[in-house]
Amino acid sequence: SQELEQSPQSLIVQEGKNLTINCTSSKTLYGLYWYKQKYGEGLIFLMMLQKGGEEKSHEKITAKLDEKKQQSSLHITASQPSHAGIYLCGADTGGFKTIFGAGTRLFVKA
Amino acid sequence: NAGVTQTPKFQVLKTGQSMTLQCAQDMNHEYMSWYRQDPGMGLRLIHYSVGAGITDQGEVPNGYNVSRSTTEDFPLRLLSAAPSQTSVYFCATRRTPPGVGDYGYTFGSGTRLTVV
């Protein structure tokens, strides 16, 4: 079965610094989602990537799916306290199912 | 526009009790699903539905039942609650099933369930 591994598990950054979160799949990715979850709340859709080499941006957040389609990275530029939360990647596995990684907890120090 | 509404937000059950977690959507989405979220394990798929009258099992279906009699509603039933079912439950909908179109999921705000 397909698995998604996110790294790092948690991250503390100083406000204004850049950061990268990675999502690595054990199989080829055909639909890769990035979500943000505020602590104790639901998940908010950030973006979806489907094509190898595809890159999308949402405000100061950029996500890319590598050419081989087995890894995606999420990059935040000039982090702000509002970026704090849990970032989860998800992947379509076929058979009308989507799996999610365990998440990366981001803390931003003001 | 409410989106995806889950009720209740919090629930405490005793072992062996049964209950139904409600999920309602007003977006006319075909696809609905239930996930549970546990620390360190991310989201795990319990059951899903590609349309009214059609449901199927996900990754962790044991102890749970679902039905989909309308497009709008997708209730999750716990038959006989166990402490291992203590978790946060999320309902998630999508315009089309995964693999069809480039749509994202819309999640409800979750139900935090504790089984004692």
Image: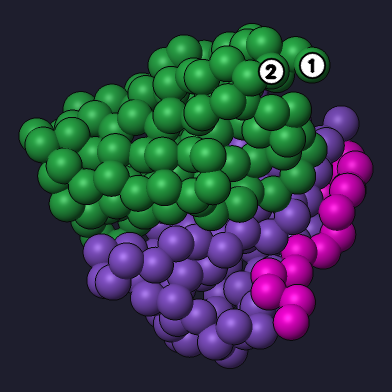
Chain colours: A green, B purple
Residue B14, given in percent of the width and then of the height, sits at 88, 40
In primary-sequence order, the first of circles 2 and 1 is: 2
Crowding at mark 1 (Cα within 10 Å: few <14, some 14-19, many 20+): few
Residue B45, given in percent of the width and then of the height, sits at 47, 48
Crowding at mark 2 (Cα within 10 Å: few <14, some 14-19, many 20+): some
Q: Residue at x 29, y 33 (%)?
A: A72
For residue A110, the mark is: 1
* Type of the residue with mark 2: Glu
How many numbered marks are there?
Answer: 2
Is residue A5 in view? yes
Mark 1: secondary structure:
loop
Please report, as a chain letter, where disc 2 is located.
A
For residue A4, above or below residue A43: above
Residue A54, given in percent of the width and then of the height, sits at 22, 47
> Which residue is labeled 2 in the image?
A15
Residue B92 image-quadrant placement: bottom right
Decide which of A6, B10 is in the foreground and name it.
Answer: A6
Decide which of B54, A97 is in the foreground and name it.
Answer: A97
Mark 2: secondary structure:
loop
Is residue B45 in view? no
Find the magenta span and give its range. B1-18
Image quarter of the N terminus of chain B = bottom right
Image quarter of the C terminus of chain B = top right
Residue A65, given in percent of the width and then of the height, sits at 24, 39
Q: Residue at x 83, y 49 (%)?
A: B17
Residue B87 image-quadrant placement: top right
Residue B11 inside the magenta-drawn segment: yes
Residue B27 inside the magenta-drawn segment: no
Is disc 2 in contact with disc 1, using a CB cutoff of under 8 Å? yes
Decide which of A80, A27 is in the foreground and name it.
Answer: A80
Dot 2 and dot 1 within a common chain? yes
